[in-house]
Amino acid sequence: MAPVAMRSVAKSLSEAKPVSYWLDDPGRPDPQPALTSDERCDLLVVGGGYSGLWTALLAKERDPGRDVVLIESKEAGWAASGRNGGFCAASLTHGFANGLARWPGELAKLEELGARNLDAIEEAVARYGIDCDFERTGEIDVATEPHQVEELRELYEEARRLGLADGSEWLEGEALRAEVDSPTFLAGLWDRDGVAMLNPAKLAWGLKRACLEQGVRIYENTRGLKMARAGRGMTVETPYGTILARRVALGTNIFPSLVKRVRPFTVPVYDYALMTEPLTEEQLASVGWKNRPGLGDSANQFHYFRITKDNRILWGGYDAIYPYRGKLDSEYDHRPETYLKLAEHFFTAFPQLEGLRFSHAWGGAIDTCSRFSAFFGTAHSGRVAYAAGYTGLGVGATRFGADVMLDLLDGLSTERTRLEMVRSKPMPFPPEPLAWTGIALTKWSLARADARGGHRNLWLKALDRFGLGFDS
C-alpha cells in the first residue's frame, strides 16, 4: 500500500475508542452485589457469560423449584460474550466442513439439533423480551480467491448430496455483489436461515435479567477460587464466602477451569475487531446490504463482518494471537498493529467507503481447542459438569452446551449425551514451549497456504490426518 494511502488508513483509527462497541452502552446494567457470606444451593453455576447464563436459566425452566446460584468474577457478559461479532449460528461443529470431517456419521443429527437450538434461542429472546436486535438474516461465506470458489462450491455440492443444503443458496459474481458490493467478492454461499445477527452484550444482559426474574441468585465480582468435595456435594470458595452446592456447572471457558485436568484442552486466542461510525445513506447505498446477512471470507486467516441496527459495519478477525505460554492478560486486549492491518483490509474490500472512520477498536480472548468445537465432561463422580472449547462460535452453541451439562448433572441419557461429539474429547495441547512452537508453525503454514492458492504444506497435512489444528 502506498504511503499516502497508509496514512489515510491510520487516520481512520484516530478517534477509535479502545473498548468493545457493545459494552460501551449507557444502558449497561449495574452489577449485582458480590457474595459476602456462605451460601447453599442445589446448583452452582460458575461463570456469567453465555454458557453460565443459559445453564442457570435452563435449570430453572426445567425445574422452577431448583435453587440456583451463579457467580461471576467480574460482570455478566464482560468477556467474550460482550466482545464478539454477534453471529448467532445454528452450527454446533464450527461450521459444516469441520462437522463433516469429524463426525460424518452423525452430522445430520448435529445439524438438526443445531437448527432446533437456534429456534429455541429465538423463542427465548421473544418470550423473555430480550431487546438484542435479533435478526435472522443468515450468513454468506464469500470466496475472494479462485481456489476458494472451487472449495466453497465443492462443499455446497457435498451438502446437497447429503440432503443438508436446505436454505442455502449459491451466489456468483454479480449475484453476490448485488447483496453486498465488494470488488474482492467472487462467489458466495448464503445460509439464509442458519445464522442470526444480534447485539451480543444485550443478549448477555437480557439473559442475566431473565435469570434474576426466575429466581436465580447472581453474585458478580465473585471469583471461584477453589473447589472441593464435601459429603454428597461440592464446595466452592470465593474471596468473601463459601458455597455448598449439590451440583456445579462450570461455564468458565477460557479462564482456568476449577477442574485442573481440563486446562490442557484449551488455549487462549486473542481476536480483534473494529466498528465504523454509522454509514450515511449514500455510503449505505454504495455497498447495498439490504438483506443484512453476516459475512465471512473463506481464507484460513479469515475476516468476519456484519452491519448493525444503526448501520455501522463491524470488521474483525484475521489475526489470531496466541500469547506465549498461554498467558491471559488485559494488555493483549488491544493491538494497534492488528487494528491497522484490519483497517487496511477493510478499505481493500470496500474502497467506496474511503474516508469512513472507526469509532471503536477492541480485542479479547476466546477459548480454542484442537477440534475447534465444544467438548464436555463430568468430574467428582458426576457432581460437576463442564463445557468449553467453543472457538469463537459460542453465541448460539453455548445454549446447547448448557443443556448437555444439565443432562449430565441430572444423570440423563438423551439424544445430546449419546452423541459421539459429546462423549469424545479433543486432543490436549502439549506443554510449553511445545504448544507455542506448534501454534506458531501452524499460523505460519496457514498464512503460506492462503498466499499459495490454498496449497497445504506437510505440517498442515499431518495435522489434518490426525484431526488437529488451531483456529480463531
Image (tube, helix red, strand yellow):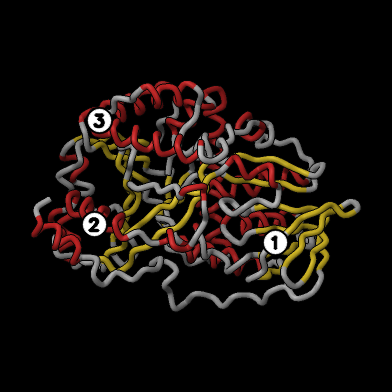
Mark 2, secondary structure of its residue: helix
Q: Amino acid at mark 1?
A: Gly
The CA span between labels 1 and 3 is 48 Å
Direction from residue 73 to residue 26 in the image, left or right: left
Direction from residue 252 to residue 44 in the image, left or right: right
Residue 104 appearing in the image: yes
Figure disc tally: 3
The image shows residue 44 at horizontal and vertical percentages of 74, 59
Seen at 17% across and 50% down, the residue is 348
Q: Amino acid at mark 3?
A: Val
> Which of pointers 1 and 3 lies earlier in the amino acid sequence?
3
Q: Which residue is mark 3?
A: 149
> Which of pointers 3 and 2 lies earlier in the amino acid sequence?
3
Observer-nearest of 258 and 424: 258
Neighbour tally class for label 2: few under 14, some 14-19, many 20 plus, Cα within 10 Å: many
Q: Which mark is residue 224?
A: 1
Mark 3, secondary structure of its residue: helix
Q: Amino acid at mark 2?
A: Ala
Q: Which residue is mark 2?
A: 343
> Does residue 386 lie above or below 286 as drawn?
above
> Which of pointers 1 and 2 lies earlier in the amino acid sequence?
1
Seen at 24% across and 28% down, the residue is 453
